[in-house]
Image (cartoon, grey):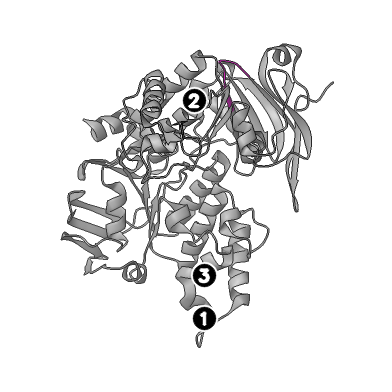
Amino acid sequence: MANRSQHLSLETASAALLRMDNISKSFPGVKALQDVSLDVRGGEVLGVIGENGAGKSTLIKILGGIHSADAGSIKLNGRLLQLATPRQAMQQGIGIIHQEFNLIPFLSVRENLFLGRSIQRFGILSRRTEQHLANEIFQKLHVAIDPETSVSQLSIAERQLVEIAKALLMEVKVLVMDEPTATLTPKEVDYLAARIKELSAQGIGIIYISHRLEEVLELTQRVVVLRDGHRVAERKTNTTHRRELIELMVGRDIANEFPKIQTPRGRVRLEVRDLTWRNRVKKVSFQANAGEVLGITGLVGAGRTELARLIAGIEVPDSGTILIDNQPVCLTTPRQAIEAGICLLTEDRKNQGLILKHAANENFTVPNLDRFSQNGLLSRRRIAVALGDYIQKLQIKISGPTQKAAQLSGGNQQKLVLAKWLERDCDIVVIDEPTRGIDVGAKYEIYLLINQLVASGKLVILISSELPEILGLSDRIMVMKAGCLAGIIEDPRQSSQKELMEMAAF
C-alpha cells in the first residue's frame, strides 16, 4: 500500500490548485521535513497543524521562497514552480501572512500596501491611484480602514487585515495565514473568520496554520497533521474532533487536556488593596493563597496585564497597597519584587521575556546572577549543570546551552523563560498568557508544571485569554472589565465560558 504521506489521491490531485509533493529539507543536525505532501483547492481552507518543531514553518518558508527544498516539487495549477526568492513566490500569486507582521508602524496604511511597488505616472508617485486601489481592496474585505491612517493607530485585527490586503493587491491565488488570531480578542477572531470565508468564496485557496483547534475545526474543510517533520494524517474536519487531532499531533493519548490537581489551600500569601494605576487599574482588591492557582481573565484592555506589571514592580501604582504575608511591601522596581519572592513571566516572551540574540545559558542566568557568581566571577560549570537539569525536566528541545534563544521554537522559548524563573524559586509566580502561540503538547507540559508549583506550596497567578484553560486550571477566577474587578468565580468547576464572557463584557 502506498504511503499516505507521500502520495495524494487521484481525486485530490486532479482538483488541486496548489500541490506540494514529497518535500524534504534538512538543516545542520536536523531533518526538518521528510517527504511531506499537501494540496489545497481553489476556494478551500486547508488547516495545517502540529507541535512546535513539527515542520510547519519550514514547509511554509519553502512555499514562500525563503528556503529551498532539498527534494520534492511545487505545482500551481499543474505548472511546476521554481521559488528561489520571496519575490518569485509573490509573483506567482502565493501570499504569506507571517505570525509576526511585516508592517512599518510609522508609515500610513497606503504606504505599507505599496511599499517597494509604488504606482507612478510619468515618474511621479500617483497617490490618488494608490488610494483608489486600497479602498477597492478594503471594500472587498468589507472593512472601513482609511488608507492614510498610520499603521500605529490600528488595532491588531486591523493590521491583520492590512496584511491580507497586501496579498490581495498582488492578485494572490494561494494565501497562507500563520497563527492569524494569536493576539486577537474573541470578537476580532469572529470578524477575521468572516473575512476568511469571503476570500475562499472568491476562489482563493487558503492554508490556515493555528494552534487553536476550535478555529481549525470551524474554518477548514480538511486538516493535515505534521509531527517531527513527517505528515502523519489528513482528516476531513466535519468527521473528526479535537481529541483526535490532539492525539495525532502529540503521538500519544492525552486523557485529560487540563490535568488539574486539587491541593490544600494554604495561608494568604498575597493581598492587594484598592490598587489603582492611571485609568487602567481601578481600586482592585483581592487575596490569593499559597497552593492555589488564581486565574485572571477578561477582554483585551481589561487591565489584566497592567495588574500583573504592578504586582511585579514594573509599574508603580498611583494608590493602593500590596501585602505579602500580611506585611505591606513597596515594589517600585522588578528587582524589589524578585527579592520579595515575586516573578512575572510576561505575555511577550520574544521582546520582554528573552534576549533573543543571546544564548540560552545567558538568558537563563540573567535573573540568577547572584546564584552563579562568587567574588564577581560567574561559574559556567554551575550554570551548565543547572540549565541541563531544566532542559531534561522541561524537555526543552535545544541543540545545547549556547544555542541562541531566537533559534528555538515558541514552545521551547516559553520553557526557557520558565526555567530561569524556576531557578529563582519565587513563592509567587505570575504567568501572563503562558501558552499563547504554542502547541498542545507544550501546553500540556506547562500545565503539569503549574501543578507542580502549587503542589510545592507556591501561589500561581494565571492570566489567560483562553477560557477553557482558565476554567480547567484555576482554583478561583477573577474576571476583570475596564480596569475593575467584575467578579470572582469561587468554583470554576461549576462555571462556564458563557458566564465568564457575560461577566467580562456586560
Between discs 1 and 2, the one toward the N terminus: 2
Give the distance between the C-alpha atoms of the residues marked 3 and 2, in whole angstroms: 46 Å
Q: Nearer the viewer, residue 188 or 455?
A: 188
Q: Is residue 262 above or below residue 290?
A: above
Which residue position holds label 3? 365
The kind of residue tagged 3 is Thr
Circle 3 — which element?
helix
Dot label at residue 390: none
Q: Where does the image place residue 325, in percent across and percent down from the top left?
A: 27, 66
Q: Where does the image place residue 320, in percent across and percent down from the top left?
A: 16, 59
Q: Residue 247, located in which quarter of the rendered image?
A: top right
The region drawn magenta spans 41-47
- Does 45 appear in magenta? yes
Residue under the image location 61 percent in, 76 percent down? 380
Q: Where does the image place residue 258, in percent across and percent down from the top left?
A: 48, 39
Tags 3 and 1 touching, CB below 8 Å: no
Q: Is residue 108 above or below residue 450?
A: above
Residue under the image location 51 percent in, 37 percent down? 257
Between discs 3 and 2, the one toward the N terminus: 2
- For the view shown, which residue lies furthest in the front direction? 122
Which residue position holds label 2? 168
Q: Where does the image place residue 53, in percent across and percent down from the top left?
A: 63, 44
Q: Is residue 95 above or below residue 296?
A: above
The kind of residue tagged 2 is Leu
- For the view shown, which residue lies furthest in the right direction? 1
Circle 2 — which element?
helix
Q: Can the viewer see residue 181 in this picture?
A: no
Residue under the image location 54 percent in, 53 percent down? 413
Tags 1 and 2 touching, CB below 8 Å: no
Q: Nearer the viewer, residue 196 or 135?
A: 135
